[in-house]
Image: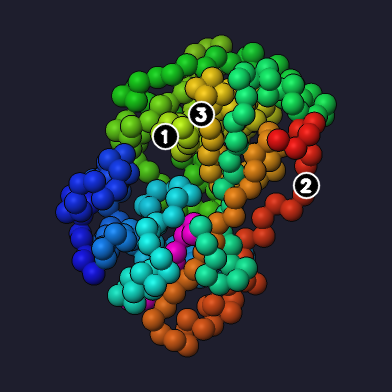
C-alpha cells in the first residue's frame, strides 16, 4: 500500500480531473492533514478533524480528534474506492478513532448516517413536473412561487461572491446540527461551480445556491440564507424549486440534493438513498464497544411516507 501526502503525487487518470481538482483545492484552502492511501486500483481519502464522534448518530457527546475517511468537504460521496478488505487495511494503519462516512454499503447492521436525497428527472419542462404532483403538493409549490415574485435570481461570477454571501453561508453552517468543515470564502471564488444569487427589491443578497453539473448529474453543493427570511420569501423551498427547474431545463438525469432537510426534499419529489457509517479503533476492546453502540445511536431517517405524485413514477 502506498501513502501519498498530496493529491499531486497520485497518478493522472486514476480519478477524474474534477475530483482531483477539488481535492487539490481543499489541500490549498482547507488543509486538514489530508492523506491518500492507494493499493492497486483502490484509493482512500483521509483527513483529521476534532468533532463529536456521535454527531451523526444521536445525542451522545464525545468530542475527539479523529481521522475521517471521506472528502474534507460536506458532501455525500463515499471517501474510498475499493472493497471492505482494502478499507480495513487502511484503518489498521491509522491510530486512534477513525470514522468512515457516507458509505454506500453497510458494515455494521443498522449503522446509518444522514441519507442522501435525489430527484430523478423524467420531465421535459417544469410545468410537466407540476402536472404530475398531487393537488396538495402542487398547491404548496404555487404558494411558494408566489412569494418568489418578491425576489430576482441571477447567476454571478465566482469572483463576485461577497462577504455578504459568505455570511449567509456561515449562518447555515452555524445552525447546522451536523457540523464538519467550514469552508473559506476563497473556496467559493475558486471552486468550479455555478453560484446563483437571490436578491430582494433593494438588490441585497437574500440567499445563494452553489451548483455543479457533471455527467448528467446536477449537484447541490452549498447554500446560504438567514433563518429570519425563510417565512417571508418561503426561501428554502424556493431555492429547491429553482434547482429542480434548472435541472429540468438542462435535461440532467439526476439532481443530487445532498443530505439533511429530509421532509422538505421528499415533499418536492426526492427519493431517499441510505448512507452508512462505521467507527473504528485498533484497540479491540474499544472497537467492540463502539460497534455495539453504533446501531442504537444511528441516524433514524425520515419515516413518514408522502404520496407526492399522482402515480408512482
Residue 144: x and y in percent read 70, 23
Measured in 3D between alpha carbons, the distance from the residue under mark 1 to the one under mark 3, in whole angstroms, is 8 Å
Q: Which residue is mark 2?
A: 305
Relative horizontal placement of residue 77, taking residue 187 as reference (left or right)? right
Looking at this view, name the residue that lies furthest to the bottom.
285
Of pointers 3 and 2, the one earlier in the residue sequence: 3
Point out the tag, 2 or 1, that comes first from the N-terminus: 1
Q: In what element is the residue under mark 2?
A: loop
Pair 3/2: label in front: 3
**231 in relation to 25, above or below:** above
Which residue is found at the position 71% from the left and 22% from the top? 130
Picture quarter with the N terminus: bottom left
Q: Which residues are magenta?
A: 95-103
The residue depicted at 35 percent of the width and 21 percent of the height is 157
Q: Determine which residue is flagged by label 3.
A: 252
Residue 85 position within the rendered picture, expressed as x and y whole percent measured from the top left = 39, 72
| First in residue order: circle 1 vs circle 3 | 1
Amino acid at each position: 500500500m502506498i501513502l501519498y501526502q498530496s493529491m499531486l503525487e497520485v497518478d493522472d487518470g486514476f480519478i477524474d480531473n474534477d475530483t482531483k481538482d477539488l481535492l487539490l483545492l481543499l489541500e490549498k484552502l482547507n488543509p486538514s492533514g489530508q492523506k491518500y492511501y492507494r493499493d492497486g486500483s483502490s484509493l482512500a481519502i483521509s483527513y483529521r478533524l476534532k468533532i463529536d464522534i456521535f454527531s451523526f448518530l444521536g445525542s451522545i457527546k464525545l468530542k475527539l480528534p479523529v481521522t475521517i475517511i471521506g472528502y474534507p468537504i460536506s458532501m455525500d460521496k463515499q471517501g474510498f474506492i475499493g472493497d471492505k478488505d482494502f478499507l480495513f487495511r487502511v484503518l489498521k494503519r491509522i491510530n486512534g478513532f477513525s470514522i468512515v462516512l457516507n458509505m454506500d454499503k453497510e458494515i455494521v447492521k443498522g449503522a446509518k448516517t444522514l441519507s442522501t436525497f435525489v430527484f430523478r428527472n423524467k420531465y421535459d419542462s417544469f410545468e410537466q413536473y407540476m402536472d404530475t404532483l398531487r393537488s396538495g403538493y402542487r398547491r404548496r409549490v404555487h404558494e411558494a412561487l408566489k412569494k418568489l415574485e418578491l425576489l430576482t435570481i441571477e447567476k454571478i461570477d465566482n469572483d463576485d461572491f461577497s462577504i455578504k454571501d459568505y455570511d449567509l453561508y456561515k449562518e447555515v453552517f452555524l445552525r447546522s446540527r451536523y457540523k464538519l468543515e467550514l469552508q473559506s470564502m476563497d473556496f467559493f471564488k475558486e471552486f468550479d461551480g455555478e453560484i446563483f444569487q437571490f436578491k430582494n427589491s433593494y438588490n441585497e443578497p437574500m440567499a445563494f445556491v452553489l451548483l455543479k453539473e457533471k455527467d448528467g448529474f446536477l449537484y447541490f453543493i452549498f447554500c446560504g440564507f438567514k433563518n429570519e427570511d425563510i417565512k417571508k420569501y418561503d426561501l428554502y423551498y424556493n431555492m429547491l424549486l429553482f434547482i429542480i427547474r434548472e435541472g429540468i431545463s438542462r435535461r440532467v438525469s439526476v439532481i443530487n440534493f445532498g443530505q439533511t432537510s429530509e421532509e422538505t426534499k421528499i415533499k418536492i419529489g426526492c427519493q431517499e438513498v441510505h448512507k452508512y457509517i462505521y467507527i473504528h479503533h485498533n484497540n479491540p476492546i474499544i472497537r467492540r464497544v463502539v460497534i455495539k453502540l453504533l446501531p442504537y445511536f444511528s441516524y433514524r431517517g425520515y419515516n413518514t411516507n408522502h404520496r407526492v405524485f399522482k402515480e408512482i413514477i
